[in-house]
Amino acid sequence: MPQRFECAEHFICHMPSNPHSHRSFKRTYDLPGHAHELTFSCYRRLPLLNADRTCQWMADSLNAERNRGLFDLWAFVFMPEHVHLLIRPRGPDADIARIRQAIKEPVGRRAIKFLQEHFPEWIERLSRRRGKKVERLLWQSGGGYDRNITSAPALTAVVDYIHMNPVRRNFVAGPADWFWSSARWFENRDKSPVRLDPIPAEWLA
């Protein structure tokens, strides 16, 4: 399991030693049958997922929304300051923006509430003022990165890319050594903290 930090300083403002550059935003195309590689970042690229507590909230949210039947989850990884997901919407009228919002919002609410109760001195780092309004943000504004996946080779490449994130950052030696990743499910070494859906055979050809 990756090292996690329980103190407020690491929960909020401990920056990773070698943060990788984030890819730019791409417009969402809600096309039936397509899978989507989604990436979204924590506010100001702060490592707010450094705590297992926050990762568990993300896992809870993913499990809840997946159980609602909105999408199939094919791969994921939670990094200290961002999340990668590979999903395929189940309905022909699926709205990726709404799916993404449904996943992120509960995590943001729980994290902000926890900090207000236990570490209120750090809330200012997650605050953004717009006129007289003050917003508390766990996630960076905007849709993040969204790439449509339509072929088996692209799918395989995306799964490998997602699982190799912790290895590229030198956090672990192998993909399955990172607890908050579906690589453990793929290698059948352990159960994933988030239940995955089977990838249809035609996507693995």
Image (cartoon, rainbow, N blue to C red):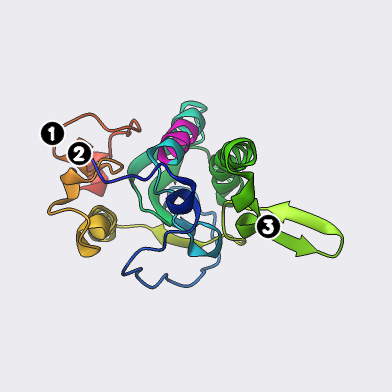
Question: Residue drawn at (47%, 60%), measured in percent from left and top?
Answer: 146
| Residue 107 visible somewhere in the drawing | yes
Numbered tag placed on residue 159 in the rendering: none
Q: Which residue is mark 3?
A: 127
* Residue mark closest to the camera, 3 vs 2: 3
- The answer to which of 97 and 24 lies nearer the viewer is 24
Q: Residue at x 50, y 34 (%)?
A: 61
Residue that label 2 marks:
184
Mark found first going from the N terminus, 3 or 1 = 3
Name the residue at 17% across, 44% down. Answer: 176
In the rendered image, the residue lying farthest to the right is 132
Q: Amino acid at mark 3?
A: Ser
- Any part of residue 205 in sight: no
Query: Label 3 crowding class (10 Å Cα cut-off): few <14, some 14-19, many 20+?
Result: some
- Compare marks 3 and 2 and give the one earlier in the sequence: 3
Q: Residue at x 46, y 32 (%)?
A: 66
Compute the Cα span from label 1 to label 2. 6 Å
Give the residue at mark 1: 189
Cβ atoms at labels 3 and 1 below 8 Å apart: no
Amino acid at pointer 1? Arg
90 or 144, which is in the foreground?
144
Mark 1 touches mark 2? (CB < 8 Å): yes
Disc 3/disc 1 C-alpha distance (Å): 40 Å
Magenta stretch: includes residue 96: no
Q: Amino acid at mark 2?
A: Arg
Quadrant in which residue 110 is drawn: top right
Q: Which residues are magenta?
A: 55-62
Q: Quadrant of the N terminus?
A: top left
